[in-house]
Every structure is written in C-alpha cells, then in structure tokens.
Amino acid sequence: MTHPDISYAVHLVSQFIASPRSTHFAAVLQILRYVKGALFHGFHFFSKSSLDLCAFCDTDWVGDPIDRRSTTGYYFFLCSSLIFWHSKKQTAVSRSSTEAK
C-alpha cells in the first residue's frame, strides 16, 4: 500500500506464485532493483500548502485479458500527493458486452 508505483507489477507477478517461471523471477528482480533505487523517495508537505483532499474512483470492464475479470479502484490525494489507494479484482466474470446505463 505504500508503493503505488509498483503495485501493478507486484499484482501481476503474484498471480503466478503457485507455478512461477524464469520470466516471473526476472520480473521480481526488476521490481526489487527499482525499490532499492527508490528507498529515499517520499511525501513532501510544506507549511503553507492548503490541505485539499480529493478522491477519485474508476472501474474497467474485462480489463485483465488473462481471466477476463473487471477491476475497481479508488484513490485519495492530499494536496498533490497520493495518500491512499485500493484496487480490487471483481469476483464475477463478465460474459456480456452490454453496458449498464
């Protein structure tokens, strides 16, 4: 939750934890190299900045081509810094291309 910049990569690699291959191991090594290089990155707030809180949400339809499940997510910004986010893959598989209105 504290590294939204790598969350998608970790999510994809974690789907293959039951039967990993060498390509998945290479992806994990790349993620670890990135984390090692970004250890001292963080949030910076100034005393004169206004504390505006903004929230956004989004849903995709059949966004994952592997299992054809939709993903829902939301995130919160304080000033211009991301402070919280959540993403969840839906449990039901979409079988129709009809969109609800």
Image (tube, rainbow, N blue to C red):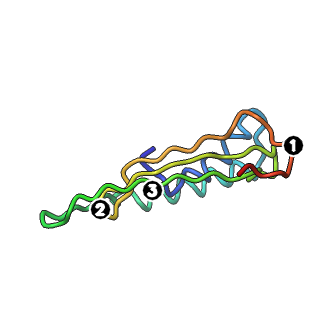
Kindly report the distance in space between the C-alpha atoms of the residues bearing marks 3 and 1.
41 Å
Give the residue pinned by disc 2.
Answer: 79
- Note whether 42 is above or below 19 in the view shown: below
* Mark positioned earlier in the residue sequence (2 or 1): 2
Instruction: Indicate left or right for 36 with 60 as reference.
Output: left
* Mark positioned earlier in the residue sequence (3 or 1): 3
Q: Secondary structure at mark 3?
A: helix
Report the front residue among 46 and 61.
Answer: 61
* Residue kind at label 2, given as amino acid type: Cys
* Residue kind at label 3, given as amino acid type: Lys
Closest to the camera, between mark 3 and mark 2, is 2
* Mark positioned earlier in the residue sequence (3 or 2): 3
Q: Secondary structure at mark 2?
A: loop
Residue 11 is situated, as x and y percent measured from the top left of the image, at: 63, 45
Kindly report the distance in space between the C-alpha atoms of the residues bearing marks 3 and 2.
27 Å
* Residue kind at label 1, given as amino acid type: Arg
Give the residue pinned by disc 3.
Answer: 36
Report the front residue among 26 and 44.
Answer: 44
- Note whether 18 is above or below 35 in the view shown: above
Residue 40 is situated, as x and y percent measured from the top left of the image, at: 33, 59
